Amino acid sequence: MSEALELIRRTRQASACLSDLDDTAINRVLCEVADAIDASVDVLLGANAKDLSRMEKSNPLYDRLLLNKERLKGIAGDVRNVSTLPTPLGTVLSDTVRPNGLHIRRVSVPYGVIGVIYEARPNVTFDVFSLCFKTGNACVLKGGKDADDSNRAIVALIKGVLRKAGIDEEVINLLPATHEATGELLSANGLVDVVIPRGSRRLIDFVRENAKVPCIETGAGVVNTYFDKAGDLEKGKRIVFNAKTRRVSVCNALDCLLIARERLCDLPALVGQMPGKNVELYADAESYAALEGKYPAALLKKASPEDFGREFMDYKMAIRTVSDVKEATAHIARYGSGHSESIVTEDAAAADFFRRKVDAACVYVNAPTAFTDGAQFGLGAEIGISTQKLGARGPMGLAAMTTYKWLIDGDGQVRP
């Protein structure tokens, strides 16, 4: 038996112990994990430094990989926050009494064992554990080699807290950072209940095409914002700048600005803050002409067809000119990934049309796509952004980490 399969098998066995924990015990452990993060900053940053030393700072993934004192403080706060959230377990989703007297309820329960495959994002290790543990799920983690030292230090910290609490530490395991381990996880039918990939489109496609266990697609985001002919310029400037530059490596970052032809004269002002962040613009012919001489030449490029539908994950953005909201939604239908889309407009009819026609998990009016986040939605935290339609969609908070079962109480009834 391979190392990866043995770890998966041990996680499955350990998962049974979680049903014995009440919410008070779960919350106590989460708070102890948060305390351990605060007490282990130097250890965690030392492990992260080893990972960072193997990656060029120019790599768009560098920001995702980076941990620092401020981020660790935020992560500890996020874990504590999860402990304060109401448990979704045992929620009665439906309750009925049939004419024959059978009492039938549909009640939320854990999946059991959740596998998560992710890339250079060590914070995900804490996110996944806190959400899985809160919902009574064990977790099998498969991180990327870029973050392996960080992930191993994090899992060691969590296991130490679990041991002190008298809980089987095998309820969380980190697989080797190898392609073979990914294959073992995707083939672990009967041991893993669901796999969630978090990362690039390439990773998500690989998981979907090779998984023998159920999977939930998350992560990849080709994100567009349409500046309508009735758009407010001041709002648009703030929204576009925030959506593009807040954090370029995350899945809700803006990739393509669509602008109404009637507003091309406002395009230089709309992107006027971008040079301060050295944002490269890949503009179609009309928008290029509107920007030429008004945007730094070194940062202004002519767009190729491949630049539309491209997730940049960098200080780069495509621009395309469209005639109206109808053409904008047609562009999104062709190039979007079903993640997050936004319109800037003061025209209520245009906003309603955009909401109806855009098929995405999150559709915004006069707000940046940067808000696509479980915490921002009031979910407390998230395990990812689902871009599929079956089951979870959009930010996946605690409720998305549960399934349900039917409970039927009778009093001797028999079926005729």
Image (cartoon, rainbow, N blue to C red):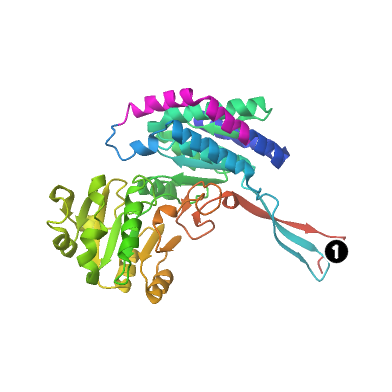
Residue at figure coordinates x 49%, y 60% from the top left: 389
Indicate whether 204 appears above or below 163.
below
Q: If the image is split into quadrants, where does the C terminus sit?
A: bottom right
Residue 299 percent across, percent down from the top left: 18, 49
Element on which disc 1 rests: loop
In the displayed orientation, state which residue is furthest to the bottom.
349
Q: Is residue 38 left or right of residue 349?
A: right
- Dominant SS in magenta: helix
Residue 231 percent across, percent down from the top left: 32, 68
Residue at figure coordinates x 41%, y 32% from the top left: 147
Specify the amino acid type for callout 1. Answer: Gln
Indicate whether 407 appears above or below 380.
below
Residue 93 percent across, percent down from the top left: 68, 59
Which stretch appears magenta?
30-55
Residue at figure coordinates x 46%, y 23% from the top left: 42
Tag 1 residue: 413
Viewer can see residue 223: no
In the displayed orientation, state which residue is furthest to the front.
234
Give whichever of 96, 275 is nearer the camera: 275
Q: Is residue 289 left or right of residue 249?
A: left
Residue 94 percent across, percent down from the top left: 70, 62
Count residues near mark 1 (Cα–Cα under 10 Å), then give few for <14, some for 14-19, many for 20+: few
Residue at figure coordinates x 32%, y 61% from the top left: 234
Viewer can see residue 54: yes
How many marks on residues? 1
Magenta stretch: includes residue 166 = no
Magenta stretch: includes residue 45 = yes
Indicate whether 244 appears above or below 52.
below
In the displayed orientation, state which residue is furthest to the right.
412
